Image (spheres, helix red, strand yellow):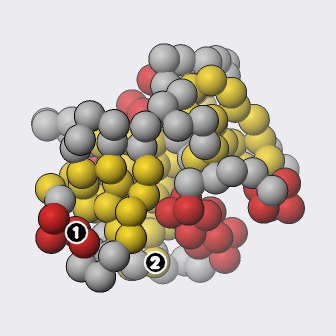
Amino acid sequence: MAKLIYGERIGAEARLAVASSAIVFDSARTKLLLQRRKDNGRWCVPGGQMEPGESAEEACVREVEEEMGLHVQVTRLIGIYTSPNRIVAYADGNRYQMVAFSFEAQVLSGELRLSDETIEFGYFSPAEIESLDLMEDHRERIRDALAGQLEAFMR
């Protein structure tokens, strides 16, 4: 189970990991695509860790395809999130301070599907998202995406 732990400079007690996530709007740009994670049952935007030999953009595209069956194209960088005051702790004992890139992405092809990481998915309005059990750091990414700021956030 992945959970977030907060503390002053707690990142010093963890390893660094680089990840990418995708903010995918519906065609009307009124709802965002979310997935419910298998490991902790919580909602989040699709994404995950980069693999050696790929770029952050490539990781974003790969993760959306693996987790949800959609082929996407990255259209802009929303933000880079590197807080040393937050780590992700996994059931296997691994703990990471994330260097996370959040991209807006557009669906090119594919059909939404479940995967070994995704047990549910859907498009949700900002009001609907407020009532979901959403990963806290993903609320920040969604809020930044909805702000419509052209420059990338750095948090």
Q: Which mark is residue 153?
A: 2
Q: Is residue 140 above or below residue 3?
A: below
* Quadrant of the image containing the N terminus: top left
As drawn, is 138 to the left or to the right of 43? left
Q: Secondary structure at mark 2?
A: strand
Residue 149 location (% of width, % of height): 59, 79
- Choose top left, top right, bottom left or bottom right for residue 79: bottom left
Dot 2 and dot 1 residues touching (CB under 8 Å)? no
- Which residue is at 60% across, 35% downward? 41
Q: Who is closer to the viewer here, 18 or 61?
A: 18
- Which residue is at 44% across, 50% downward? 3
Question: How many numbered badges does the structure rendering display?
Answer: 2
Residue 108 location (% of width, % of height): 59, 31
Sequence-wise, the earlier of marks 2 and 1 is 1
Residue underneath mark 1: 11
Decide if residue 74 is in sight here.
no
- Which residue is at 33% across, 76% downward? 7
- Choose top left, top right, bottom left or bottom right for residue 136: bottom right
* Quadrant of the image containing the C terminus: bottom left
Q: Secondary structure at mark 1?
A: helix
Decide if residue 133 is in sight here.
yes
Residue 11 location (% of width, % of height): 22, 69
Dot in front, 2 or 1: 1
Q: Amino acid at mark 1?
A: Gly
